[in-house]
Structure formats: structure tokens, C-alpha cells
């Protein structure tokens, strides 16, 4: 995951920590969440920053360190969480095998992909790019942010819509949160899907993105998805680049 910085607010200073795993859980057939305890530390972060997480001793061609956007919210005290795809790389396999009490080396918080609810917000998530938006939306719900907030979330198959139950619950309890799903390859899943099929595209954005509200637009997903969204938003729909913030997820 690559963070594209955007200076807006004063950020907490990063520092090294060694934190124990509280628990891990499966979020989808390919994704897991890992929650680490920050009790007794000075770790603080804004919604929604990132960390560098290392597992010393792991022999991985990509290295023993990964950058993760936090999927937890500052409104959830005493912990931080990361959610990621579990690939076959040695690092991800070692992460998946961690047991409660095992420790990871964490440096953070870092990055400035930050929620700003002073204006309407539009979140565009592709696949595991939902990670920072879960934290942002949890924070907005917990703090009573006025919104309006709109999430347009695309996944390959229905079962890969990570955090779907929680997002549905937030949408049901918050009238200022508008939630839209789309699935790009519904026929590849045994799970029935009666919702929209296809990628996030210009017509869908024009219909449900509420661009007339001049929102701050947050985009997170694989590089190809992010690049396509930037082109559509800026070059075709006229959204100023200053109103767009994004993160790239590499996936290894």
C-alpha cells in the first residue's frame, strides 16, 4: 500500500512500537483483520492514517516490512487494526499464522490520507481499498459527523465485499450515509447477486456520486483503478485535483 500525502492537519509524530496481537479474524475468503493492543503506549492517530508493520525474521523477497492503512478508528480505544489480502507471500503467510500475544514491530502513525467532514465526502473503494474507509466511516458514525457521506464500493464477487454487514448497519442507523455496492464478476461466485454489476464508471458516478454537492473525493484501490478514477473525475467530470485524495494498494 502506497500513501499519497496531502498536508491538511497537524499529525501525531510517528514512533516505533512493539505491539501484541489481540485477535485476528477472517473478513472474506481472501482478507483478514489483525487487531493489536496499544494499551500502555502513546500511540495515537488521526482518521485514517497508516503504519509500517514488520515481522523480524521473515524471509520474503519483498522484505519483512509492509505499509498498511489502518482499518480501525481513533474512536476505538486501546487498539489498532489492519485488514489485508492474504496472499501466498511469506510475509502474509506469517501474518496469518500469528496467534494472540505474538508481537509485531510497528512504526507510526504515518501518512495523511485524512478524513475531513467539513464538506460532503465521496469514497470510492476498489476491493481491499475499503480498508481506510472502514476506519473513516466508523469514526464519522461514532463522532456524529454531519456528512453527507457517500460510499461507492466495488468488489470482484459479493463475498469479497469486506465489512459489508458493518457498513450496512452504519447506513441503516445514519441517514447522512449513502451506500452503494457493485460487483464486477458476479457469475464467478456461488453467492446470488441481484445488485449492480460492473465497475465504478462515469455514468454511475454521475447518478449516485452527488458531485453537485462538490464533495471531497477519496479513492483507494489497486493502481489501475485509482488511475482510472482520477482520469474520470478530473478530466471528464471536472472535479478539481485539490478535491481528490487517494491511496494505492499494491497487494503483495
Image (cartoon, rainbow, N blue to C red):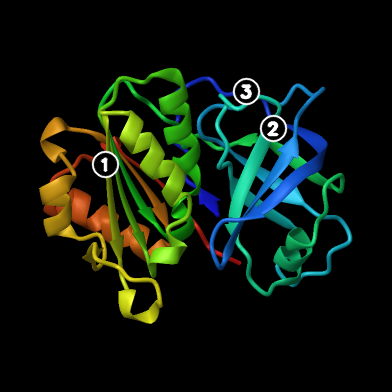
Cα distance in 3D space between marks 3 and 2: 16 Å
User: Residue 141 location, x and y as percent?
Assistant: 41, 27
Indicate whether 41 appears above or below 24: above
Indicate whether 191 appears above or below 221: below
Mark 2 or 1: in front is: 2
Question: Which callout, 2 or 1, points at the residue further toward the start of the chain?
Answer: 2
Look at 24% across and 68% down and name the residue there.
198
Can residue 64 be seen in the rendering of this structure? no
Q: Quadrant of residue 140?
A: top left
Mark 3 or 2: in front is: 2
Indicate whether 1 appears above or below 123: below
Q: Nearer the viewer, residue 224 or 136?
A: 136
Residue corresponding to mark 2: 79
Q: Nearer the viewer, residue 217 or 74?
A: 74
Residue corresponding to mark 3: 12
Q: Secondary structure at mark 3?
A: loop
User: Residue 233 location, x and y as percent?
Assistant: 21, 50
Residue corresponding to mark 1: 241
Cα distance in 3D space between marks 2 and 1: 34 Å
Q: Secondary structure at mark 2?
A: strand
Question: Which callout, 3 or 2, points at the residue further toward the start of the chain?
Answer: 3
Which quadrant, please, contains the N terminus?
bottom right
Mark 1: give few (<14), some (14-19) or many (20+) Cα within 10 Å: few
Amino acid at each position: 500500500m502506497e500513501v499519497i500525502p496531502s498536508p491538511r492537519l497537524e499529525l501525531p509524530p510517528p514512533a516505533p512500537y512493539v505491539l501484541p496481537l489481540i485477535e485476528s479474524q477472517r473478513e472474506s475468503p481472501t482478507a483478514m483483520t489483525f487487531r493489536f493492543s496499544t494499551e500502555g503506549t502513546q500511540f495515537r492517530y488521526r482518521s485514517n492514517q497508516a503504519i509500517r508493520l514488520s515481522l523480524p525474521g521473515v524471509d520474503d523477497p519483498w522484505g519483512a516490512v509492509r505499509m498498511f492503512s489502518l482499518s480501525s478508528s481513533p474512536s476505538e480505544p486501546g487498539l489498532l487494526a489492519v485488514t489485508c489480502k492474504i496472499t501466498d507471500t511469506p510475509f502474509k503467510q506469517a501474518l496469518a499464522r500469528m496467534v494472540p500475544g505474538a508481537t509485531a514491530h510497528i512504526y507510526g502513525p504515518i501518512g495523511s490520507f485524512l478524513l475531513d467532514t467539513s464538506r460532503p465526502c465521496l469514497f470510492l473503494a476498489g476491493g481491499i481499498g475499503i480498508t481506510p474507509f472502514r476506519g473513516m466511516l466508523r469514526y464519522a458514525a461514532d463522532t456524529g459527523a454531519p456528512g453527507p457521506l457517500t460510499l461507492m464500493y466495488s468488489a470482484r464477487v459479493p463475498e469479497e465485499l469486506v465489512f459489508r454487514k458493518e457498513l450496512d448497519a452504519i447506513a441503516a442507523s445514519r441517514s447522512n450515509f449513502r451506500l452503494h455496492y457493485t460487483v464486477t464478476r458476479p457469475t464467478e461466485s456461488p453467492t446470488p447477486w441481484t445488485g449492480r454489476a460492473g465497475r465504478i464508471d462515469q455514468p454511475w458516478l454521475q447518478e449516485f456520486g452527488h458531485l453537485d454537492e462538490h464533495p471531497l473525493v477519496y479513492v483507494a484501490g489497486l493502481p489501475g483503478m485509482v488511475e482510472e478514477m482520477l482520469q474520470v473525475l478530473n478530466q471528464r467530470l471536472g472535479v478539481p485535483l485539490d478535491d481528490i485524495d487517494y491511496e494505492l494498494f499494491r497487494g503483495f
